[in-house]
Image (cartoon, grey):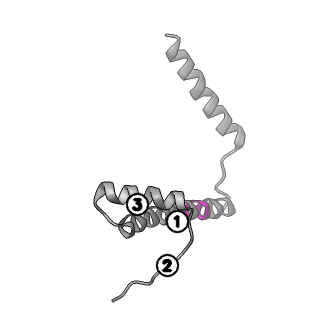
Amino acid sequence: MASPVLSFRVESDLIDQLDQLAAATDRDRQYHLKRALARYVEAESWHFRAVAEGIADAEAGNLTDLDAVKAKWEARAKNRIDQQSGK
């Protein structure tokens, strides 16, 4: 089964870098573009899902008090400072 074709414009400097990478790795442009696109889509999809989960949690009332979060990070920072100063 044939794969769909994507077409888009990019700066010539980026094409030059891609061609250098392809030559250095003995792979073609398509190989690197597919890998780059797959990694990008995976990262963006993860972020989108995480935001959606956060919104669902907030709507369900699963929230953390801001003062509690601040206190946790302040204690963590104090602990790190104390460890560095030998206390």
User: Looking at this rendering, what residue extends furthest in the top direction?
Assistant: 86
The amino acid beneath tag 3 is Asp
Circle 3 packing at 10 Å, graded few (<14), some (14-19), many (20+), is some
Q: Earlier in the sequence, mark 2 or mark 3?
A: 2
Query: Looking at the picture, how far across and down is residue 64, in whole percent?
Result: 66, 47
Q: Position of residue 10 (x, y in %)?
A: 56, 66
Q: Which mark is residue 45?
A: 1
Q: Please state the extent of the stretch shown in magenta in the rendering.
A: 49-53
Per the image, label 3 sits on a secondary structure element best described as helix
Q: Which residue is mark 3?
A: 19
Residue that appears at 56% across and 18% down:
81
Q: Earlier in the sequence, mark 2 or mark 1?
A: 2
Closer to us: mark 1 or mark 3? 3
Q: What residue sits 57% from the left and 62% below the top? A: 11
Q: Which residue position holds label 2?
A: 6
Q: Is residue 76 above or below residue 40?
A: above
Q: In this image, 37 relative to 47: left or right?
A: left
Q: Position of residue 23 (x, y in %)?
A: 33, 58
Camera-near label (2 vs 3) is 3
In the picture, the quarter occupied by the N terminus is: bottom left
Using the numbered discs, state the Cα–Cα distance from disc 2 to disc 1 in whole angstroms: 20 Å
Q: Is residue 85 magenta?
A: no
Q: Residues within 10 Å of mark 1 (few under 14, many from 20)?
A: few
Q: CA distance from mark 1 to mark 3?
A: 28 Å
- At 61% from the left and 32% from the top, the residue drawn is 73
> Of callouts 1 and 3, which one flags the residue occurring earlier in the amino acid sequence?
3
Q: Are marks 1 and 3 in contact (CB under 8 Å)?
A: no
- Between 53 and 60, the one nearer to me in the picture: 53
- For residue 87, the mark is none
**Observer-nearest residue: 57 or 24?**
24
- Closest to the observer: 73 or 13? 13
